[in-house]
Image: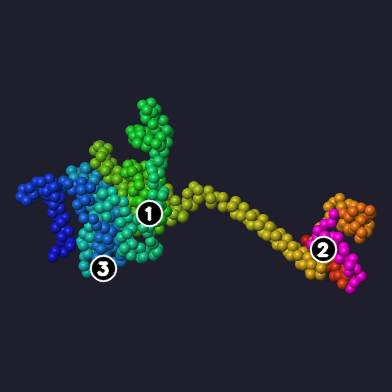
């Protein structure tokens, strides 16, 4: 029995003929003659040139698993760690994608010829030469096998974007190889399903289309030339995005300078899984035309290379797809030089940077290429540093005020504790009335003060319920009950030993309180 891979190879080689033979059989045509077989193969290839038909007939497969399997064979063969092999693979693919617009430009100017390696930019040549030298060292030259495997993996990696299937293939490979564990950063990437859900929450339900349309409307308003379209009955608002897009693009040279692109930023971009999920919700024209700018930062240089390769190189973010098609769309007299085109390519890939999002910010150099600088070098950072002396003085004053408030509170708490201790001691000896009996109302106090017998200011009866021939005044409740009840109890014990002892204890409590007051230690 043939092995599975042999069956797959046979099927791949004969697939065009099989496809057309199937369609011919469905239409009742003769399919067995040699002439028919040749016709089947030629027509089948035309059918398979359609991406929809190609996906229908090619067996489904998981590119991430196949890439993992191929790269595993490489690191077992070469002795390099998975992290090293994976990084080399990503860097080779990234250099290839960066050279792709230059290859198209050279082919346009040289009748379809392939760009010679020696004419590629020096920084791309260095990437290739450094990686090649790493696998040529030792007793055996592994580079031919490594190069062939990398090319096969690159082809697998490009299958999804070719059919506009958005997925994070490299992130899965990075995890499956165990390369993330060797980075020293304890990385674990967001699963694709979760990234899709988060993208739907933030950008789904037409939110991103409304945002882009709103920005186009603002650009059209700043341009100020939309009156002829509105006079023809065109409605320019958020409910008519196609009309807004038509007017914007018909006057692109006038409207684009006023357009403020929507920015999406990922401060810990990883393999760009969140960005790719977000791109899957966007119309293709938004991505190709740079109506949306996708920024990212990461502390792992391999993650930066992954994000650049997938988000920009494979899915065309930040107008990279336009740069690839530019050599074939422009008139020959309008074609840029290789140097200028490569500068634009570097500008597209520079939207993803290696750095620390907490301490660094994006800026542009003299060529317009994005780069990261420490926040202290930005205008905002410089202004913050310039005001550091004032902030220190304010902080010192704040600490001084807080310290004074704390000292005052401690003194108040200490005084309150002392007062409570005296009150507790008085309560223990039955003298809580010294503190807790409330005074009677003001009019009663005035009447009581006229009575020499009751100059203490408390309402009292005279034993028979009358005072100076009048009914007793309103009594005032205290901690021990109303005043009349207290007087009755006092008269009942008058002259007893308990009354004498109580008088001594009250005198002692009053003397202690007077001492605290006169020495200034209570308040």
Q: Position of residue 467 (x, y in %)?
A: 92, 55
Which numbered disc, 1 or 2, marks the residue that appears first in the sequence? 1
Q: Tell me which residue sits at (13%, 52%) in the image.
A: 18
Q: Position of residue 58 (x, y in %)?
A: 20, 53
Magenta residue span:
474-497
Residue 252, quarter of picture? top left
Secondary-structure class at tag 2:
helix
Return the residue at label 1.
195
Q: Is residue 448 visible?
A: yes
Disc 3 packing (10 Å; few <14; some 14–19; many ≥20): few
In terms of secondary structure, where does tag 3 sit? helix
Residue beneath the point at 27% across and 47% down: 101
- Residue 76 is tagged as 3
306 w.r.t. 76: above or below: above
- Judging depth in this view, the residue of 278 and 23 nearest the camera is 23
Which quadrant, please, contains the C terminus?
Answer: bottom right
Asked whether the residues under the numbered discs 3 and 1 touch, taking CB atoms below 8 Å apart as contact, a structural biologist would say: no
Residue 299, above or below 240 = below
Q: Is residue 373 magenta?
A: no
Could you say where residue 162 lies in the image, as x and y percent from the top left? 26, 49
Horizontally, is 347 left or right of 508 in the view? left
Closer to the chain start, of discs 3 and 1, is 3
Place of residue 391 in the rendered image (x, y in percent of width and height, measured from the top left): 59, 52
How many numbered marks appear? Answer: 3
Which of labels 3 and 1 is toward the front?
A: 1
Query: At 26% from the left edge and 49% from the top edge, which residue is drawn?
Result: 163
CA gap, disc 3 and disc 1:
33 Å
Q: Quadrant of the N terminus?
A: bottom left
The scheme the figure's colours follow is rainbow
- Give the residue at mark 2: 433
Residue farthest toward the front in the current orientation of the protein = 464
Q: Residue 496 magenta-drawn? A: yes
């Amino acid at each position: 029995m043939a092995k599975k891979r042999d069956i797959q190879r046979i099927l791949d080689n004969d697939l065009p003929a099989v496809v057309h033979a199937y369609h011919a059989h469905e239409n009742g045509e003769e399919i067995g003659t040699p002439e028919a077989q040749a016709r089947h193969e030629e027509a089948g290839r035309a059918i398979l040139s359609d991406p929809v038909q190609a996906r229908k007939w090619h067996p489904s497969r998981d590119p991430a698993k196949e890439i993992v399997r191929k790269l595993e064979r490489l690191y077992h063969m070469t002795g390099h760690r998975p992290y090293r092999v994976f990084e080399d693979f990503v860097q080779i693919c990234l250099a290839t994608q960066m050279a792709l617009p230059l290859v198209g430009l050279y082919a346009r100017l040289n009748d379809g010829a392939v760009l010679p390696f020696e004419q590629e930019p020096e920084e791309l040549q260095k990437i290739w030469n450094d990686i090649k030298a790493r696998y040529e060292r030792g007793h055996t030259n592994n580079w031919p096998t490594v190069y062939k495997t990398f090319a096969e993996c690159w082809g697998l990696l490009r299958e999804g974007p070719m059919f506009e299937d958005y997925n994070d293939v490299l992130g899965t490979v990075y995890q499956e190889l165990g390369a993330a564990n060797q980075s020293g950063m304890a990385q674990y990437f967001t699963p694709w399903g979760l990234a899709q859900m988060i993208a739907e929450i933030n950008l789904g339900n037409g939110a991103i289309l409304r945002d882009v349309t709103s920005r186009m409307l603002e650009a059209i308003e700043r341009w100020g030339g939309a009156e002829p379209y509105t006079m023809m009955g065109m409605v320019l608002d958020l409910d008519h995005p196609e009309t807004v897009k038509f007017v914007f693009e018909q006057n692109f040279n006038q409207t684009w300078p006023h357009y403020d692109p929507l920015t999406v930023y990922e401060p810990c971009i990883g393999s760009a899984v969140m960005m790719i999920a977000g791109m899957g919700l966007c119309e293709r024209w938004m991505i190709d035309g740079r109506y949306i700018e996708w920024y990212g930062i990461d502390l792992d240089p391999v993650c930066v290379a992954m994000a650049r390769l997938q988000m920009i190189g494979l899915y065309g973010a930040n107008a990279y797809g336009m740069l690839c098609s530019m050599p074939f769309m422009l008139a020959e007299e309008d074609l840029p030089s290789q140097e200028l085109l490569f500068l634009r390519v570097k500008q597209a890939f520079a939207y993803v940077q290696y750095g620390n999002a907490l301490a660094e910010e994006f800026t542009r150099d003299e060529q317009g290429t994005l780069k990261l600088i420490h926040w202290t070098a930005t205008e905002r950072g410089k202004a913050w540093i310039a005001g550091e002396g004032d902030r220190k003085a304010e902080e010192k004053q704040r600490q001084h005020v807080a310290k004074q408030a704390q000292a005052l509170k401690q003194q108040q708490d200490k005084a309150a504790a002392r007062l409570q201790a005296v009150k507790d001691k008085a309560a223990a000896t039955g003298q809580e009335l010294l503190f807790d009996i409330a005074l009677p109302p003001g009019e009663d106090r005035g009447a009581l003060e006229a009575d020499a017998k009751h100059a203490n200011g408390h309402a009292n009866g005279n034993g028979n319920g009358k005072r100076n021939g009048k009914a007793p005044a309103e009594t005032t409740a205290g901690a021990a009950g109303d005043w009349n009840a207290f007087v009755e109890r006092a008269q009942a014990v008058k002259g007893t030993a308990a009354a004498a002892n109580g008088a001594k204890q009250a005198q002692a409590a009053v003397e202690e309180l007077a001492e605290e007051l006169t020495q200034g230690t209570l308040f």
